[in-house]
Amino acid sequence: MATIGVGVLVESTIPSLAATKWRNSVASSLHDRRVRVSIVNRLGNGRTMNIHCQSRDDDLGYLRIPDGYETEWSFNVNIWGTTLFYCDVQWGDSEWLHFDAYSYKSDSGRCDTVCRWMVAEDGLLYVYNQENEKWEHMPFQDML
């Protein structure tokens, strides 16, 4: 009986060790993944853009970005694959507009290691898709 108990224990431990190694490998590869986000003001006509970006853990503060300039930051994706940075932008008399500057769930393929955003002259938001090498219009989201 003791031998059977040990055999069962060994059989159930081996898959757990393999699963633990796999989870640690995935977590390590996510944590080692560095992402850079850049947001450029292309509003034109000298219009300055106000921007406030943050994650659950990091508040990057309020910035004023002159026409033709950009802001950027970089970070490591968290081990759970739930990293999210979001921004609110405003210019002139416009309302504050919201978008997710990086969401691991939606941007890990599209942005890979660099997420490039542009607020264009028409007031629309664009993201550069690294998979198809094209700028894509992205709607602003409702403010919560």
Image (spheres, grey):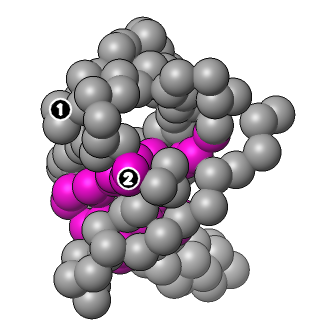
Please identify the quadrant where the C terminus is shown: top right
In front here: 34 or 61? 61
Q: Which residue is mark 2?
A: 120
Using the image as rendered, state which of residue 8 and residue 63 is in the foreground.
Answer: 63
**Measured Cα–Cα span from mark 2 to mark 1:** 12 Å
**Residue 45 vs residue 36, the one in the foreground:** 45
Residue 77 on image: x %, y %: 34, 47
Look at label 1 and name its amino acid: Tyr
Q: Position of residue 75 (x, y in %)?
A: 26, 36
Residue that appears at 47% across and 55% down: 122
The 10 Å Cα crowd at callout 1, few under 14, some 14 to 19, many 20 or more, is: few
On the image, numbered disc 1 is attached to which residue? 69
User: Which residue range is magenta in the image?
Assistant: 98-121
For label 2, the SS is loop
Quadrant in which the N terminus is drawn: bottom right
Q: Position of residue 140 (x, y in %)?
A: 63, 52
| Residue 136 in which image quadrant | bottom left
Q: Is residue 62 visible?
A: yes
As drawn, 38 above or below 50: below
Q: Amino acid at mark 2?
A: Ala
